[in-house]
């Protein structure tokens, strides 16, 4: 289903009580914008409670505990923090039940937020529950969709194919509300003369090895070797490496020993500026592929699995647990593999360099991606230019009214 962002009137009698549970920084950003939109669309007072970060705090939420208690990545880190995470799950459940809100909104981070939602549903089944951001049931463990329908009343999806996927898999009622990137696409698109014509002698290559330390450790050296191969016959190639702040120093230390000069840029503004200049990219799998597509930058995508997921991959050959032919978001949305992807041992430097070399010319491979990105933009756009947060807020208020 696709929803429009029509204004929903709200009666200003008792304050509207909204309990939100986010699990990491990206969810905090979504939650803050949702809170803003709810305040704009609801005529009366709204009282917020739950779990969030600094952005949600600025909108009026006093978090039960810091997001840093639960925002951990990687199997080892989760196991080390498991007692604290379990404690925080039950703390959030107790607070939600005691607050008896008009709606509970869980935001992304399914390993944490869904454990909260399941327990709230058992203890207070009358509280309507909205899940903002669908887990990747279309790619990983599709059986989760049907299980979610027991404790999620309405799902707000960020990808346009997800409503159909949940309907096929027996998931909850699902609406496409748009991706956060839609509202920021203008920041990624080059102004006139900001991106020179490809092949003009001032080409720019982006290296994007990921936002997690494990990703960077597995991909950075091979990205560097691929860049060296390219620079050997493209001496004027400029290489930019946007880095997330918590990994920037580590990355600078690693690339300092490379034979090729690489400029590491830090911060979102510098990253978006680099995107607007870039002609091609070599990137880790993730949301960055959608950012590159929005910017019109052809790319090759790589991902390597750690030992745990390599083992699952072997098990998958006997007991299937994944259901898509690509892990690249533009490919999945378009329904065809436009962006080349390289998994594990396939991500060899010479292979990566050969593909990127074609993308740095006016080749068929480059033009195919550029044309596909225009189609992708039309597919992801909401009708009549409605915003993501306003659409999400309308659907939350509509569920409260129905409940």
Image: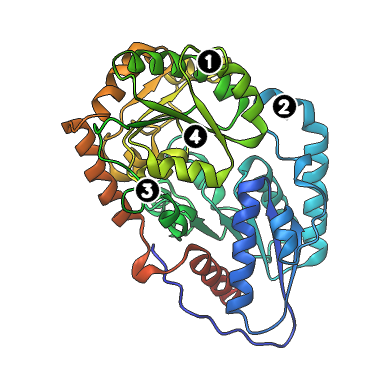
State how far apart marks 2 and 4 are (Cα). 22 Å
Is 58 situated above or below 313? below
Q: Nearer the viewer, mark 2 or mark 3?
A: 3
Residue matched to label 2: 77
State how far apart marks 2 and 1 are (Cα). 19 Å
Q: Mark 1 and mark 2 in contact (Cβ < 8 Å)?
A: no
- Whole-percent x, y for residue 20 in the image: 69, 59
State how far apart marks 3 and 1 are (Cα). 34 Å
Q: Mark 4 and mark 3 in contact (Cβ < 8 Å)?
A: no
Is 318 situated above or below 59? above
Q: Mark 4 and mark 2 in contact (Cβ < 8 Å)?
A: no
Residue 311 is labelled as: 1
- Whole-percent x, y for residue 288 in the image: 46, 39
Q: Nearer the viewer, mark 2 or mark 1?
A: 2
Please report whichever mark, 2 or 1, sits nearer to the chain's N-terminal start: 2
Quadrant of the rendered structure where residue 397 is?
A: bottom right
Please tell me whether mark 4 sits on a helix, a strand or a loop. loop
Please report whichever mark, 4 or 1, sits nearer to the chain's N-terminal start: 4
Residue matched to label 3: 294
Q: Quadrant of the C terminus?
A: bottom right
Query: In front: 46, or 13?
Result: 46
Q: Nearer the viewer, mark 3 or mark 1?
A: 3
Residue matched to label 4: 141
Q: Nearer the viewer, mark 3 or mark 4?
A: 3
Q: Is residue 220 left or right of residue 24?
A: left
């Amino acid at each position: 289903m696709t929803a429009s962002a029509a204004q929903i009137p709200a009666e200003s009698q008792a304050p509207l009580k909204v309990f939100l549970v986010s699990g990491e920084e990206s969810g905090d950003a979504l939650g803050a914008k949702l809170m803003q939109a709810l305040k704009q669309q609801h005529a009366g007072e709204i009282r917020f409670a739950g779990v969030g970060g600094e952005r949600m705090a600025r909108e009026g939420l006093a978090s039960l505990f810091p997001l840093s208690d639960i925002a951990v990545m990687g199997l080892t880190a989760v196991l080390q923090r498991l007692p604290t995470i379990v404690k925080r799950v039950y703390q959030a459940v107790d607070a939600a039940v005691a607050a008896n809100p008009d709606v509970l909104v869980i935001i992304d981070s399914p390993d944490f937020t869904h454990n909260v939602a399941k327990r709230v549903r058992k203890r207070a089944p009358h509280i309507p529950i909205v899940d903002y951001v669908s887990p990747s049931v279309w790619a990983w463990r599709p059986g989760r969709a049907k299980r979610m329908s027991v404790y999620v009343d309405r799902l707000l999806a960020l990808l346009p194919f997800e409503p159909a996927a949940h309907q096929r898999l027996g998931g909850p009622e699902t609406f496409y509300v748009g991706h956060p990137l839609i509202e920021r696409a203008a920041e990624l698109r080059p102004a006139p003369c900001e991106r020179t014509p490809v092949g003009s002698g001032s080409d720019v290559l982006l290296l994007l090895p990921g936002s997690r330390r494990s990703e960077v450790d597995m991909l950075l050296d091979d990205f560097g070797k691929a860049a060296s191969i390219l620079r050997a016959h493209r001496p004027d190639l400029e290489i930019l490496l946007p880095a997330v702040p918590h990994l920037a120093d580590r990355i600078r230390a690693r690339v300092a020993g490379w034979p090729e000069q690489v400029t590491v840029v830090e911060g979102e503004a510098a990253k978006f500026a680099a995107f607007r200049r870039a002609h091609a990219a070599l990137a880790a799998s993730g949301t960055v592929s959608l950012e590159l597509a929005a910017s019109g930058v052809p790319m090759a995508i790589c991902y390597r699995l750690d030992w745990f997921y390599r083992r699952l991959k072997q098990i998958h050959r006997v007991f299937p647990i994944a259901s898509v032919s690509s892990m690249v978001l533009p490919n999945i949305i378009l329904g065809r593999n436009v962006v080349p992807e390289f998994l594990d041992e396939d991500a060899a430097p010479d292979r990566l360099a050969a593909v990127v070399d074609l993308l740095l010319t006016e080749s068929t491979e480059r033009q195919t991606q550029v044309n596909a990105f225009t189609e992708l933009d039309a597919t992801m756009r909401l009708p009549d230019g409605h915003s993501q947060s306003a659409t999400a807020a309308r659907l939350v208020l509509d569920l409260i009214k129905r409940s």
